[in-house]
Amino acid sequence: MFFLRVHSVDTEQPLAFEVAEFISTTTASVPNPNPKFTERRGVAHLFRSTSHSSLPNPSSRSTLLFIVAVPNYLSFDDLIRFCGSHIDHVSELLFIRNDGMEDRYSVLIRLVNQSTADGFYCSFNGKKFSPGEAEVCHLLFMMSVEYTESAEIAGTPPPGCTELPTCPVCLERLDPDTSGILSTICDHSFQCPCISKWTYLSCQLCRFCQQQDEKPTCFVCGTLEDLWVCMICGFVGCGRYKEGHAVWHWKDTQHCYSLDMRTQQIWDYVGDGYVHRLNQSKNDVKLAEMNSHCMSSEGDCGTCGCSDDSGISGALFSSKVEAIVDEYNRLLATQLETQRQYYESLLVEAKSKVGSSISEAVEKAVTSKMQDIQIKFEKCLEEKNAVADINRNLIKNQEIWRKKVKEIEERDAAAQRLRDEKILDLEEQIRDLTVYIEAQRTLGNMTDSDGIREGTLLPLPNKQSSPASTKRQTKSGRRRN
């Protein structure tokens, strides 16, 4: 059973972004057509009841869900798209931003009923925000949410509750019965590169574990030995075998979870025992699952059965080692299967890209060839039209020249007829002149001119003469008379 208190002096600000377009394209009948999307700035404090189990059950479930941390590279619009069709069942969604944490923000989601809340929890709890990243969605059922302007009230646990860290990496290291986070070791690799994305300027504990540029010291006495780090606020104090400043910090602030800087083990002051589930080695920064719980004190007491070298402890240790090896083997098999699926998806994507590129190249080549053929066809059409125009002009010129040739032939025929007529006329005239000359010559040779003086000149029989010869005869007759 979880409770949330938010130290905030701000009010809820409505958000206006692309969610309207996104919701309008999901389903035709939306259960909640007008969800409320707001943003608030403040510091979230997460508490858990110590009297109930953290596993989901009918008594601890509610319609209010809390996403512990959303990476900052995921915008508000991206988170809504990440929720998919489940956003239709959301009645209220509140983004909580902490100015001191630039790399992440938290989200409160209120669903319309318990069945939709259970479906939302089952669908997204433990799901990666992005396939290529390591951060996963950690969801918790919230029993109540309080807003206060007092930092002291916000940091004070309710009766019967203990405060939990809001860092997802710190929650990951706690036992499931304490943290409520059901996922196991980071599923990217044992080197946990994803932790470095959450640490800088956000979680003091992660920064101490991952980036120790200088040797840490107790904030009170300055000692370098037996240091414990508060998982809630990052306070560094010495253990109870030094000055006990870590215990004093718990009594003053009720921050009950503290991490041993030497062994990377987590101590619960309320339960008086270790509650860590994952242990991180300083040498190779690997995470290992821890199943043993020393219930004596902070660290190695030297008196309990944990340090006993008897056969029973050896057998227990061997069984624990075998369990860890089995867990690692299962994890390795899971990772190999995940990598296989990932690379198969890459191969499928590459094949699809190659197929699409080939189809695009073929289409481009065909288009280019069609364009060339179209250009050649257009040129042929232009040439055909030009030849047709020339042919029409030639036919037109042929008709014109035919007419001209006919006219010339007619003119030649008329001229030939005129020449023939002129030649006939000239021949008749020559004949008449010959006859006349012969007649004159005969008359000149005749002595008896008186005998023919009263004579009559008869015409000679002749062929049918032409009008021209008739004219000549008329003329010659006139001359004779």
Image (cartoon, helix red, strand yellow):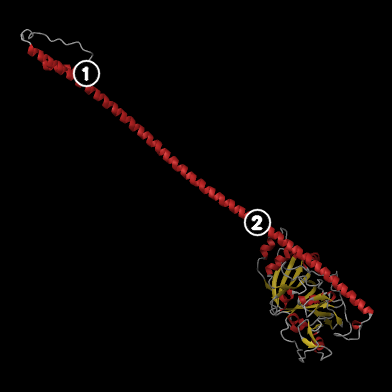
- Assess whether mark 2 and mark 1 are in contact (beta carbons under 8 angstroms): no
Q: Position of residue 423 (x, y in %)?
A: 22, 22
The residue at the far top in this view is 451
Tag 2: Cα neighbours inside 10 Å, few (<14), some, or many (≥20)?
Answer: few
Element marked by disc 1: helix
In depth, the one of 74 and 193 nearer the eye is: 193
> Left of 69 or right of it: where is 273?
right
Quadrant where the N terminus is found in the figure = bottom right
Does 274 sit above or below residue 368?
A: below
Residue 442 - label: none
Quadrant of the rendered structure where residue 295 is? bottom right
The residue pinned by badge 2 equals: 356
Q: Amino acid at mark 1?
A: Pro
- Amino acid marked by disc 2: Ser
Residue placed under numbered mark 1 in the picture:
467
- 429 up-or-down from 82: above or below: above
x, y percentage for residue 364?
Answer: 59, 54
Residue 316 in sight from this viewpoint: yes
